[in-house]
Amino acid sequence: MSVKLRDHVVFESRASMIRNIMDALADNSKSVVGVYGMGGMGKSTLLEDVERMLIEERSFDWVAKADVSKTPNIHTIQGDIAACLKLTDIKKEETISARAKLLRERLEKEGREKKKVLIILDNLWEKLDLKLVGIPCGHDNKAIGCNLLLTSRDQRLLQREMGCDREFLLGGLEKEEARALFERTVGDKVHDNEFKPWVEVALHRCAGVPFLIVAMGKLLKYAALYEWRDTLKKIEKFDHRESNGLIDQMLQWSYDRLEGEAKSLLRLCVVCSVSKPSLENLVRYGFGLGLFQQVSSMEEARDRLHTQIRALQASALLLDSEDVGGFKIHDLVREFVASVSSRDHHPLLVLEDKVESVTELQVNKLESYEAMCFPNMKELPPELNCPELHILLMSTDYESTDYESLYIPDSYFNSMRNLMVLNLAGVRLTRSPSPFQLLANIHTLCFQNCSFEDVAILGNLKRLQILSIVDSKIQRLPKEIGQLVELRSLDLSDCPELEIIEPGVLQSLTNLEELYLKQSFHHWSAGEQTQPTNASLSELNHMKKLCTLHVSIPDPRVLPDDLYVEKLTKYEIRMGKEWRWWKDCNGSRTLELKLDPFRDVLRKVCIKGILDKTNDLLLNKLDGSEQSICALSRKGFPELKHLQVKNSPSVCYILECPSLPALETLLLKNLINLEKIYHNHISIESFSTLKVVRVESCNKMEVLFPCSVVRQLPHLEKIEVVSCELMWGIVEADDDRGKLELPKLHVLKLHGLPNIANFFSAGSSPSRSTSDNQVGTQIVFFNGQQVAFPSLETLEVDGLGNPGFMFSPSMVKSLAQLRNLTMFL
């Protein structure tokens, strides 16, 4: 038996546990509640369901959640909690103590105002100092003024170190629940008479452990009957006293089926998973290690990585992840891979925060390690004799209160001559001599939050293929970097102090495929200067392999007419004064143009070429002869997905012909002459993929869309209309087809519309006198007959012309999915 929680099924045993947890949280005498159980039981999944139900039932004013993990990052935990509380000021603070003070003050304020706050802390391995995070607590580390919901494998940790008032043991699934989960994973094959007996064997082996059930199901989903028999016979009968043994057997079976490249990638995932997991880091490290066989470019390496990640997820060795830029690995898999790697003569060393344990290791063990990771170091480990080391990841605790960057001695890497990948975070590097002078085999070198006296010390690393210096103190990219002719990728993002790239350096990097200068260098010289003091954009033409470019060009006049852009497949190009954060970019090919006072830039051939391929376009201060946005592209923007236009008085409409077939987001702001989004008739294809539309301060617009167009928007999820003085209707009734339904609309926000009376209005502008507001000429806003929003979750209404007429008494009741309602009538 199971119950439905929104869009997925929660089994009865879990639903009962969820209700018990919620009852405990509702008990004022129990402020800290915990869930414990062995690995693989689904504690984190259970918390997701609890969180969802608490938000649905509005049991708390605020629900915040953070993953603690085996290697807790206090800075990240604070950020996750603050984001849920909408405490944006915390982003301005860098130190742990300052962020903790802000967080504590906010939580104490919520307590004084009698607001209920729940903080969910998932996956505790050891005591978490709540005071250090910023959660108000007593001397015994027990939370004060807010509720905590915790998970751990260790009940004693919850009781003794975190002050839990009530703990719940999460056990295995009931027999029928286990069967349902297995069937859901494997599919219809379980109903085949040949397979049925082996389904019973598989379920018996898994004994209700969700992790095992899913892993087994993924392993057997596409297997033939003989593979089922062979697999299940090799996995010994389950013994409840040896649950981890069975998990290891299951993982071993999946691991043994991997090819060499996939095994190497999985080991790399384990090494990288102790910090924030990043697919981009996996690509750079894997490429430097030569992990990807028979790939000739960084882009091919990314494709191979994503293919292998999908394969590892299919085998349950990696978890499915909603984070497109990261990956997730279960603690059980991390522990297993670390163990089996030593057996297979590929030993890994991940020391977490315990740097002092390096001195306790036997010298002969250090000499055999191939991969080592030291996250959150407070001091540098002693010089290590690691001749077999291929990858070393070292990060200081540079986000802590008392952080001081660590100095790397010149001889530190002398015994690591086989090192191929090195990542350093929070270190200081002096001018000379270089600690890297003997790293002849280094292929990938990454720095984060580091300081350099002179980057020229890297110029002798002739085999270097990937160089990343991000969020670091660097003023100059000297001519010596031009000697790195094998370089494929150069990332200098978030280095605002970088003011000089010496002329000729970029054009020397003829093998470069990727150049990242986000939030960084932008002092480009004009190409015609006889003695330039800085790099010019014309140097990019010498990079015949360049396909990825992230760059800012404050003065578009330095843009050469002959800049070759056809080779670019990914880009983020910003021209004019910066006015949007890079992180807000939604596409892989982004162009931002702030045209005033550089209107002539639109006539450049290279810009026209970029416009034709762009899928994320922002236009600011377009004030020329163009009345339509679509007129800017020779091909009508066939790939444009996200469009934002603001402060452009010349724009009267967006569409003038059938176009924008891929558009998903449309944001329009302060377009004082915009009358309509479309001009004349538009085809069925136009806007058919639109998901989000926001119109703000467009005071000539009277109607957002005609009804005939809205019927062609089956994917529309969000509508926001703000401060449009003449707007008298959102949808204009221009057909007689009756009821209008927006099946996927989740969010509707209407603010500052003094002349609007209805959402769905008749085909002419109503009189502004209230006597004309009659049902005969205008259709009631939500009457259940003419317009339906079956999926609406958020409704915000403020400053409308005649809200009493727009909303019927039973309107809110008819919106079954509504979770957030804000009305100022």
Image (cartoon, rainbow, N blue to C red):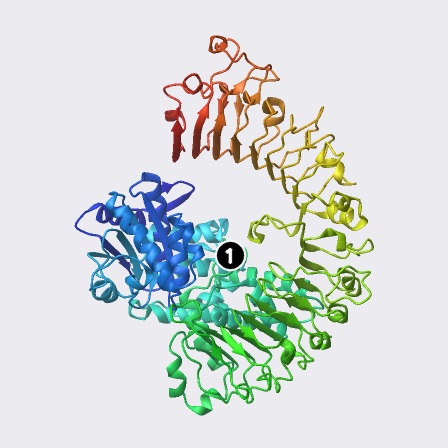
Q: What element carries label 1?
A: loop
Quarter of image, res 666: top right
The type of residue carrying mark 1 is Lys
Q: Which residue is drawn at 76% across and 52% down?
A: 557
User: Can you see residue 178?
Assistant: no
Q: Nearer the viewer, residue 247 or 567?
A: 567
- Return the x and y of residue 711 as percentages of the image width and height: 59, 26
User: Where residue 647 appears, x then y in whole percent?
Assistant: 63, 37
Q: Which residue is drawn at 47% across and 8% down?
A: 771
Q: Nearer the viewer, residue 132 or 520?
A: 520
Decide if residue 677 is on the left or right side of residue 535.
left
Question: Total marks drawn?
Answer: 1
Q: Residues within 10 Å of mark 1 (few under 14, many from 20)?
A: some
Q: In this view, does 48 lie above or below 811?
A: below
Q: In which quarter of the image is the N terminus?
A: top left
Residue 287 lies left or right of residue 377; in this view the side is right
Please state the horizontal and vertical placement of residue 566, each as a whole percent of the image.
Answer: 78, 54
Q: In which quarter of the image is the C terminus?
A: top left
Left or right: residue 645 compared with residue 356: right
Q: From what the image shows, is residue 355 above or below residue 767?
A: below
Q: Is residue 668 left or right of residue 275?
A: right
Is residue 624 in sight in this rendering? yes
Q: How far across and down, in percent of the image, does residue 432 sit? A: 60, 85
**Location of residue 54 by image quarter:** top left
| Residue nearer the viewer, 238 or 672 | 672
Q: Which residue is drawn at 39% across and 27% down?
A: 824
The residue that label 1 is drawn on is: 221
